[in-house]
Each structure stands twice: as C-alpha cells, then as structure tokens.
Amino acid sequence: MGKVSIGLRGWRFDEEAVFADDGTIRPLDNMDADTRERIVRLSAMMGEPCDCCYLIHGEEAIERCNPARAIYGEALGEVLLCDDHEADFVYWFQEEGGKRYAGERELQARFHEWFADGGRAPEGFELEHVKEDPDDVPEAPDPDEELPGLEEEIEEMDDDELDALDMDLSDIDFDG
C-alpha cells in the first residue's frame, strides 16, 4: 500500500493508516494523532472555496469562487486551491521562498499576503500531477461531499471519547 490523496489533492496519507481492509475509512481512534487531525480537518475543508478566489471576490461574491480541489500546508494553516490557482501556490512555494514555511501554520498567512499583493505564477508555469496505479487505490470521496462515515462516527461519540481525541471539531458542520 502507498500514499494517497483523499478528496482533495495535496495532503498524502498512508493508505493503511486511513483505510480498513474493506476500503472504508478506519475509526478515528485507530489513527495516529497527525493522521486523525488531518482527516478531520480535511472533512471540514471539502467543499470550501479556493482561498485565492476568496481573496479576489470576498464573501460578498463567494458564489464566484471556484471550489477547492487541492490542499497544502498544515492543519489549521492550510491553503485551499482550485485548479486555476494551484500553480500560483506551487510557484510561490518553489520559486518565491514559500518553502521556508514548510511545516509551519504560518505558510497560509504568508501565501495569502503574497497573492493579495499581486503575486502570481508566470505565464507558462504548469503543474504535472503524477498518478501511480490509480486503480489500486480505494475510491476517494467526492470533494464536494463529506468523508463517508466520519461525521456519523463523531456524532456517536460521547464527551469522554471526544475529549480523548484532543481536537477542535468546531469546523465540522453536522447539519450538512
């Protein structure tokens, strides 16, 4: 088993750390803390708008924002990107010093500043997405839908079980 993206490109997970043998998502308490935090955060971020589109259009024209298709950075400091703006982030990260923020939640704020100041990838800067054995990976959920079973699992947990997860779950929309 290898590394897989789930729902959004970018964050990569060890397949066996996330999926049970039957292809369903493992219970949260069977995941290590980092994987659990990213899976829960990913669930909250799926279906959200691209950060760059949001910086351009704002809340008053949010309907003009493209949905995010990629996620980069650390949980709670992640950058959400549509297909049109992913190259801007990768260019900033590789060529404009963004790499120095790798592993830091500050990455989000620094990229937002660069983009808001007019930073963009130059014309012709392109990304290549590599897929290895895509047929061997369990089917990822649609990025506009929740991770199957995750919200139900969280809703069924009692207060002690939720406290044991030691996570902020306030971003999860339990009402759909």
Image (cartoon, helix red, strand yellow):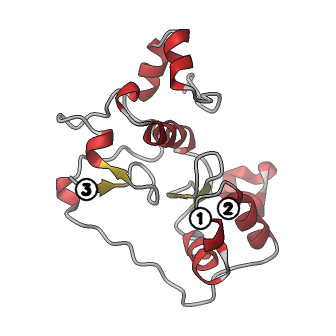
In the picture, the quarter occupied by the C terminus is top right
Relative to residue 83, is residue 171 depicted above or below? Answer: above
Per the rendering, the mark at residue 2 is 3
Q: Earlier in the sequence, mark 3 or mark 1?
A: 3
Residue in the foreground of this view, choosing between 33 and 67: 33
Q: Residue at x 47, y 13 (%)?
A: 157
Instruction: Judge whether 42 appears above or below 58 on screen.
Output: above
Among numbered discs 1 and 2, the one appearing first in the sequence: 1
Quick one: SS at disc 2?
A: helix
In terms of secondary structure, where does tag 1 sit?
A: loop
Residue type, label 2: Leu
Amino acid found under the numbered disc labelled 3? Gly
Q: CA distance from mark 3 to mark 2?
A: 26 Å
x, y (%) of residue 9?
44, 59
Residue occupying the point 45% across, 47% down: 143
- Asked if the residue at tag 2 contacts the one at tag 1, i.e. Cβ–Cβ closer than 8 Å, the answer is yes
Q: Which mark is residue 102?
A: 1
Percent coordinates x, y for residue 62 in the rendering: 72, 51
